[in-house]
Image (cartoon, rainbow, N blue to C red):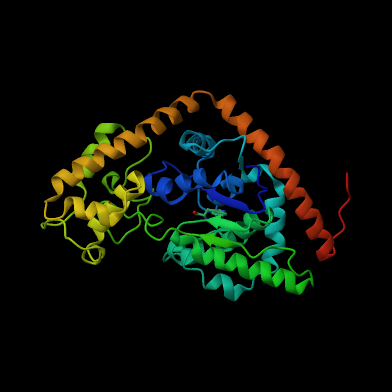
């Protein structure tokens, strides 16, 4: 069937270090399944990465590694547009326009800024504060209608919707920007730390045992699952009894996310047993699914020229759309632009 794809998806991953199974399940795995139903833009958001300090050489390597991870996970660079944010200047240009649309009060409510800036707010970069405006620009420059994001980005997406609405209203251009919808899978978009089920799995957690990286060797995966926190009980029988046990619930989410077996079915399978069999089956599944991805990422990282070609091609295709939007925006806002 040759259906016309009217809906556009954009999402982004920051090139800030080793990607883990939380990034994979919460984001990249979903991207793969969207490729057939949407026009997809998958961005590597390097401009967002520099809102906190980065080592320039490592940033470049990480950017290629996210590209490699996209491809290794099954994103087809012919179908989808894969590119890095900074290669398209219109993202930053539109972000500036949005800096003038967003109200200070809106940004002051962003919980991620408060979390990331921590106690030393005076010393945070101003980029970190206006980060959500750049994210809105990433999405709206392609007039994306759907945005797969993790639960933690929901507030930023709501801000994006507010910006789109205010722009359309202020400049009297109803429906110029679409009002994008989030696509959030509640369970798997919040994969938690293996050591603390109330904390998100994070690249910046000092404990390696809190997460499973996509580049982990099989024996590391097995060891990490073995050490993952559970409880001195057997697997409960009912889903609602599990939800209260955050570490066990998290392991079930991971199991279900990778195996695509319904959580209740898993509970029925393991109910009344202690967690050793469950854990051993879980690590088998993780190893089986992650290993081919790891191998492919490593192989692709040996061929940086190929990865750069993919980004270059993505850039050419994305830029066509982005240039059209930014030209229209300049015109709408009343800015002259010399066409070349
Ligand atoms: N802020 C997102 C995160 O940290 C990354 C991101 C940047 C993004 N631009 C985006 C996600 C646009 C979705 C759409 O996860």
Query: In which quadrant of the rendered view does residue 200 lie?
Result: bottom left
- Where residue 276 sits: x, y (%)? 14, 45
Q: Answer whether residue 126 is visible to the viewer in this image.
A: no
Ligand 1 is found in the corner quadrant, namely bottom right
- Where residue 180 sits: x, y (%)? 61, 62
Q: Answer whether residue 37 is visible to the viewer in this image.
A: yes
Query: In which quadrant of the rendered view does residue 170 lie?
Result: bottom right
Left or right, 325 with reference to 218: right
Q: Is residue 115 above or below residue 56?
A: below
- Image point 46% across, 37% down: which residue? 73
Quarter of the figure with the N terminus: top right
Q: Is residue 126 above or below residue 207?
A: below
- Where residue 311 sits: x, y (%)? 62, 35
Q: Is residue 324 above or below residue 117?
A: above
Quarter of the figure with the C terminus: top right
Left or right, 219 with reference to 191: left
Of residues 29 and 214, the one nearer the viewer is: 29
- Where residue 207 sits: x, y (%)? 28, 47
Q: Residue furthest front?
A: 1
């Amino acid at each position: 069937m040759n259906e016309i794809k009217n809906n556009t998806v954009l999402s982004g991953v920051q090139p800030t270090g080793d990607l883990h199974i939380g990034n994979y399940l919460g984001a990249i795995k979903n991207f793969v399944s969207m490729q057939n139903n949407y026009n997809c833009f998958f961005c590597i958001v390097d401009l967002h990465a520099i809102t906190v300090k980065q080592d320039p050489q490592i940033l470049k390597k990480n950017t290629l590694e996210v590209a490699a991870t996209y491809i290794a996970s099954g994103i087809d660079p012919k179908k989808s547009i894969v590119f890095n944010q900074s290669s398209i200047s219109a993202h930053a240009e539109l972000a500036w326009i949005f800096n003038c649309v967003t109200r200070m009060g809106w940004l002051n409510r962003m919980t991620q800024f408060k979390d990331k800036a921590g106690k030393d707010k005076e010393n945070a970069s101003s980029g970190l504060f206006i980060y959500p405006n750049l994210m809105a620009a990433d999405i709206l420059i392609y007039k994306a209608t759907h945005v797969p994001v993790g639960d933690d980005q929901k507030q930023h997406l709501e801000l994006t919707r507010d910006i789109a609405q205010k722009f359309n209203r202020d400049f009297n251009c109803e429906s110029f920007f679409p009002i994008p919808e989030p696509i959030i899978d509640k369970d798997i978009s919040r994969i938690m730390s293996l050591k603390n089920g109330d904390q998100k799995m994070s690249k910046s957690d000092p404990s390696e045992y809190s997460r499973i990286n996509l580049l982990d060797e099989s024996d590391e995966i097995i060891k990490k699952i073995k050490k993952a926190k559970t409880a001195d009980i057997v697997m409960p029988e009912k889903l609602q009894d599990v939800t209260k046990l955050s570490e066990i619930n998290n392991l079930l989410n991971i199991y279900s996310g990778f195996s695509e077996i319904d959580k209740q079915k898993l509970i029925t399978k393991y109910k009344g047993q202690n967690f050793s069999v469950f854990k051993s089956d879980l690590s088998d599944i993780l190893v089986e699914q992650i290993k081919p991805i790891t191998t492919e990422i490593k192989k692709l990282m040996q061929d940086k020229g190929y990865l750069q070609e993919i980004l270059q091609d993505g850039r050419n295709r994305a830029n066509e759309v982005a240039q059209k939007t930014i030209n229209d925006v300049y015109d709408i806002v009343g800015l002259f632009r010399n066409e070349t």
